[in-house]
Amino acid sequence: MTLDRRKKTTAMLLVLGVAFLLLFFLELRWAQFWPLSIREVWDSLTGKDENYRIVVVDINLPRVLFGLVVGANLAIAGAVMQALFKNPMASPYTLGLSSGASLGAAIGILFPIALIPEIVTVPILAFIFCMGTMFVVYSLARVGTQTHMETLLLAGIAIAALAQAVVSFLIYFAGEKMSEIVLWGMGSLTVSHPWSKLPLVLVLSLVGIIVMLLHSKDLNAIMLGDNHAMDLGIDVKRTRLTLLVASSLVTATAVCFVGTIGFVGLVIPHIMRIILGPDNRLLMPMCVLGGGVYLVACDYFARILSDTLGVLPIGVVTSLIGAPYFIYLLRRRKREVGWI
Amino acid sequence: MILEVCNLDYDYGGKPVLQDVSFSIRPGEMLGILGPNGCGKTTLLKNLNKNLSPKGGCVLLDGSDLEDRSKKDIARNIASVPQDNRVGFSFTVREIVSMGRMPFQSPFEGNSSEDLAIIEDAMEKTGVTEMADRFVNTMSGGERQKVIIARAMAQTPRILLMDEPTLHLDISAQFDILELVHSLSRSEDMAVVVVSHDLPMMARFCDRIMMIHDHRIRAIGKTEEVLTPENMRTVFNVDAEFHVDPVTGKRSVTMHGSTTGRAKSTGKPN
């Protein structure tokens, strides 16, 4: 690592750290009509104050934790997919994975299976559909071992449209569960019974993230090209499969609990790569931190806006920021190659 | 003799690509592989470092079968420069050259002081030290090719495999690359295997030439023995003459045209 990049890493860690502490406090003190004081937040956390315990510990704290985990998942999955496909516009959202996972989750929510609790069926279905989407999109776009950026994105868009249509179809017949599903579909960090779900979310996410981090060095060589990686002694096929499964796992985990939150996996890896360079050994852990903080920030904005607009799903905020960024990337690529 | 290929067969889904190919590679030599499109040159190269596994016969490195060696172990002995060297991400030259040490490291290991010395040395030998901190995605094709060769040299290989190393390069860059590789083969006592369509360059730089035709080795031997008008006619359907270049002392080639076309245009029976 050059001195320059080391300085930038330190600066980035500092910024993320300060932003996190600030957001952590702002999120925890949030209450419907007036914000709580530092003292009230602290006392609620330590159990001295019972009045605001529900707001701080049962509502706000899990929101922050879900935001951190989901943001980390989506950002690192984006970083991995961009490297694997050598495609700066790949992400769980743009390749249709999130939509695939949400179809699986919607089926799980709407058609409960007797005896097996929802908390088991929904993640499993989300994971299966997410993997399925990944492999359909990949095989649609693949020519030999090459995938073209354009075909990959188009395949992603097509499959996402299909999955979303089916989800809409299901919603139409959802009956009393309709509003629950619609809100969930737009992406929201408000999770019912969050504390009972967090351990599962943490375990699944950690497994996926650790697997990805273990391959960060191999992924560097794959970014040069599959041939280069093979010549450096890397089992490219196995590594690619492992990483595709791991990114499906973390994406599905994120989607089945908080719904579709778009563009996090696109924006964060990109910004990190511009500032810190492409070395995945640094980039991937920084995406975990950056994605988490970013999503908590987006959630805070959603809450501020909700004050005047009513309940605003976080997915709306991330898309309002992410979609223009995506368009900017398209424009830049158009300048580079003349077309997209 | 470091690498020995014995009776190698390869096919893609039953369609034969290589049949009964046997030859060996010696340290410090440059071996050129020539042949028409689709004759199996690149497939052969991929068999030499276990990117593909032979369907029959074997490839022996120091007498032991590649199939019994791990990919990592092979990468410590055999480096390669693939055809496509475009890089879509802003790695610096030093970062790319460092990747040449990956076969020697565990997944989380950083560069030891020995690794760092080898990396600097590899950049020095290939003349990319000045560009060490530049971004590789902003470089010209020739510069990038040198960086990839530097990465291969960081593997401290005994064999270097190159697939069309001069493709898309201008003439001066072509000479740059081949002169560099030629001198490395001598100074490092490293075997270089080059697959190429560039007949004049191969004639100029290779010690030995192998010609592949109809999935088999048509001829292999010293450059001046293999580059003959007869071989050119059989393998490429081209009328060619070879001379000794008075300046370099190497073979130079004059190609008159395809045997079929020439027969028509001159009206001469062939």
Image (cartoon, helix red, strand yellow):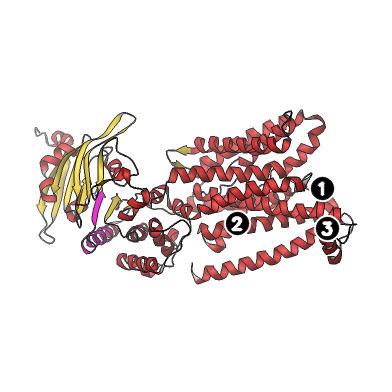
Identify which residue is drawn at 66% across, 64% down. A16
Q: Which mark is residue A30?
A: 3
The kind of residue tagged 1 is Val
Q: Residues within 10 Å of mark 2 (few under 14, many from 20)?
A: many
Q: Which mark is residue A287?
A: 2
Q: Where is residue A13? Give x, y as percent.
A: 62, 66
Element at label 1: loop
Q: Which residues are magenta?
A: B174-195
Front disc: 1 or 3: 3
Q: Is residue B115 above or below residue A117?
A: below
Classified by dominant secondary structure, the portion drawn in magenta counts as: helix
Whether residue B38 is visible to the viewer of this picture, yes or no, is yes
The kind of residue tagged 3 is Trp
Query: Which circle's residue, 1 or 2, is located before the other in the chain?
Result: 2
Q: Are marks 2 and 3 in contact (CB under 8 Å)?
A: no
Q: Where is residue A229? Give x, y as percent.
A: 41, 50
Identify which residue is drawn at 64% across, 53% down. A72
Q: Which mark is residue B219?
A: none
The kind of residue tagged 2 is Cys
